[in-house]
Amino acid sequence: MSAAVRKQPPPPASPSPPARSLDLEARALIEIAHSLDSSGDECQRLSRSLSLLKTLLRCDRCSIVFEGGDDGARRVLSVPTVVGDEAARHEQRLLMLLRALEDNAELPRDGNGHSLALPLVGLDEVRGMVAVERGGDDFTAGEMRLFSVVAAQLGAYLTMLRLHHESTALDRFKREMAALAVHDIKNPLAAVIGMVDFLSLELNQAPDHVRSCLNEIRSACNRIHRVTANLLDLARLETNQLPLNLAPLDMLALLSTLARQRTSQASFRGLRIVVRPTPPGPRARADEDLFSRVVDNLLDNALRYAPVGGRIEMEARQVGDRVQVLVGNNGPPVAQIPRGTVFDKFARGADGGRMNLGLGLYFARMAMQAQGGRIWLDETRELPVVFGLELPAAEATSSGDSRS
């Protein structure tokens, strides 16, 4: 008779964490993500996240070392805050831990309670370190996993923060270089324009082709001058830092002045510039210099694309509490692209239409928005290209219209 086989009892199953505990942990992780995406500066966001981590892991203290600000200097934050003489010792100990993590060295032992430290990594670079400490119980495997998840969140945030600082610094450098370049261009350009004007007077009886060349040189120089002025102001328009002098402005008087200034240039190509109706006309609330440059950009566009012997028409009209200015020409239509995109930065038309719309129309859109107005592209049966500008009427704004 064979011996009875004794069944071994199954090993005890590991206790699963209560559902309520998992729910609280999930909420805490979501709150940390929201804190990193909330308002406030980087120190406020990180401090809120450390407070949540302290509650989540039942720690006595949570600390972080990170590279912050445009200078990339290392900073230390702790919750609760360490003050007095202890602050320097605490910071020194954290930096020693960070160096050990960066060098893959063994972490120094701490006899006071229990501590954990993890590097904050992003794009394969160590961006800082987070450390937690408490007395009493050791950290469980579940708590260590939670700690690693939070460290990954913090590492991703610090990586995006560093990329943002680098992008901001690069953008500032580009603006400064552009301003310097424009400043260096303006003086010699003014000298060239002055010499062209002098030659035009001296060669008043010269053949038509000579005077035509001088006119083209003057037009090109004026165009460069407008582009440099626009470049200087674009950065301030994009950040709402361009000072404006908003005042009532007679639109038809302004259009007539700008048309007269272009008479000589238009006559060489047999173009007619028509302004309707005759001044005085509706008055809008605008910055005269800025609005003049917008219309001048549109006139320049029309003079380039209108056919020889063609026409350019400008009109001002009041529509309710708004004033509209229309600048059209009978040149080729803008290529078949979405109308709104022609005002984007560096927009270009498709083959067969107008090309290289560049910064001029983008500047016009930013300038109109800064004055509380708008710009759009339209067409009529007679004029394939019509640009519309709209601003608040001076009478409406003086009687309490808040649009500006």
Image (cartoon, helix red, strand yellow):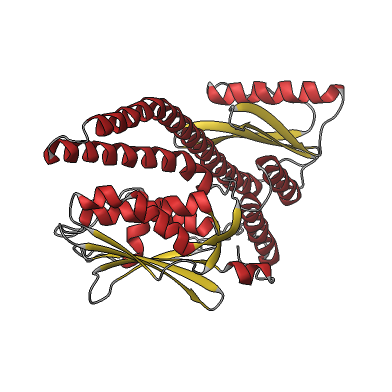
Image quadrant occupied by the C terminus: bottom right
Q: Based on the displayed image, in which of its 4 quarters is residue 94 positioned?
A: top right
Which x, y percent locates residue 336? 22, 66
Image vertical order of residue 147 relative to residue 16, above or below: above
Image vertical order of residue 216 relative to residue 374, above or below: above
Residue 359 as seen in the image, left or right of residue 311: right
Which x, y percent locates residue 146? 62, 49
Which residue is painted at 45% across and 52% down in the image? 292
Which residue is painted at 60% across and 55% down in the image? 246
Residue at the right extreme of this rendering: 84
Which x, y percent locates residue 275? 36, 65
Front residue of 150/74: it is 74
Residue 330 as seen in the image, left or right of residue 76: left
Residue 345 visible in the picture: no
Residue 275 as seen in the image, left or right of residue 183: left
Residue 300 as seen in the image, left or right of residue 239: left
Front residue of 2/297: it is 297
Q: Based on the displayed image, in which of its 4 quarters is residue 92 positioned?
A: top right
Front residue of 367/84: it is 367
Residue at the front extreme of this rendering: 205
Count of marks, rendered view: 0
Residue 105 visible in the picture: yes
Which residue is painted at 48% across and 38% down in the image? 167
Which residue is painted at 56% across and 39% down in the image? 158
Q: Based on the displayed image, in which of its 4 quarters is residue 130 positioned?
A: top right
Image vertical order of residue 394 relative to residue 189, above or below: below
Front residue of 229/213: it is 213
Which x, y percent locates residue 356? 25, 50
